Image (tube, rainbow, N blue to C red):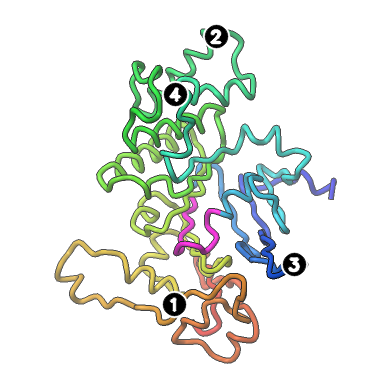
Amino acid sequence: MAAEAKKKSDYLVEVHDLKEYFPVKTGWFSTIPLKAVDGVSFNIRAGETLGLVGESGCGKTTVGRTLLRLYEPTGGEFYFNGELVTDKNIQPLRKEMQMVFQDPYSSLNPRMTVEDIIGEPLDIHHLYNTKSERHDRIMELMELVGLNAEHATRYAHEFSGGQRQRIGIARALAVNPKFIVCDEPVSALDVSIQAQVINMFEELQEKLGVAYLFIAHDLLVVHHISKRIAVMYLGKLVEIADADELNDHPIHPYTLSLLSAVPIPDPKTARESRRIVLEGDVPSPLHMPSGCPFRTRCRYATERCAEEMPPLTDRGRGHMVACWEK
């Protein structure tokens, strides 16, 4: 394994067969695994955005947190810049990988000023020589995300949701990361503010060359910011393709259903479009159906779907789909 720890790669982020199982007690001495992430694989190039979409509870956030070792992975491999990430080398790599959390209200310390919140990563990683250098760097980061210098001495509760998320983004950028996990960073914001924050993410990527794993459940937002999109259902990836390709030519029945639920601004087109409503409830991840996890809600399901999970196969132009019948 040591020989494989560093390899030449075209990708900044490589994830192979990632698994994250949480033990759940079912009795005094018995537990069963909750398979939050079950064999997920994908790649992200430097400066690229991969959107990760799916309904609540499908394991999107768990993927991001497991990559950054906020959860200890049950299985699989994660290579960052060609280097295998393990418990032994994660500490120096934390500067390269950061996270922007979903809730801007609970992810900031209410007892710290904005200057101290943004400056904390600089303190932890010793990225300055003098207090003046630290202050200048914080001012530079605040300007980068659209905050004024007078905001530095205020506390998080004095800001709106959009401003708080900007503080969180400045904190993530403080260590000059190459890769940021964006965990539904706009879902808690008003629609008008969402557009501003999304545009800022794009401007920062263009300016700094940072790569994103952009986790969200809003396909319109994901399509706007992502170069490629991965669709997740009950811990597994069911489809991956370029953003335009996925939007124009979806293949997996679950992706078709997600896209049919996206609001269409043109009334005529909206009337002509047909909503694909899935039947049944999402199965419990504690008691997963055999074979394909989507088969219990799929109109195309056959006996083969119950027997084995379909692998992701290339349907042309890098469009990967996990489905026997489509």
Residue at 64% across, 86% down: 307
Magenta stretch in the rendered image: 49-61
First of labels 4, 3 by sequence position? 3
Choose mark 3 or mark 1, whichever is in front. 3
Question: Secondary structure under badge 1?
Answer: helix
User: Could you tell me how far apart the alpha carbons at marks 1 and 4 are, in whole angstroms?
Assistant: 43 Å
The kind of residue on which mark 1 rests is: Pro
**98 lies left or right of 149:** right
Give whichever of discs 3 and 1 has the lower sequence position: 3
Tag 3 secondary structure: loop
Quick one: 151 or 157, which is closer to the camera?
157
Q: Residues within 10 Å of mark 1 (few under 14, many from 20)?
A: many
The residue identified by callout 4 is 141
Q: Position of residue 261 (x, y in %)?
A: 32, 69
Q: Name the amino acid type tagged 2.
A: Lys
Residue 138 image offset from top left, x and y in percent: 47, 19
What's the residue type where badge 3 is placed?
Answer: Trp
Badge nearest the viewer, 2 or 3:
3
In space, the residues marked 4 and 2 are separated at their CA atoms by 15 Å
Precedes in sequence: disc 4 or disc 2: 2
In the picture of the structure, the residue carrying the numbered disc 3 is 28
Residues at marks 3 and 1, CA–CA distance in whole angstroms: 40 Å
> Residue beneath label 1, please?
253
Residue 146 appears in which quarter of the rendering?
Answer: top left
- Callout 4: SS: helix
Which residue in the protein does label 2 denote? Answer: 131
Residue 181 in the magenta stretch? The answer is: no
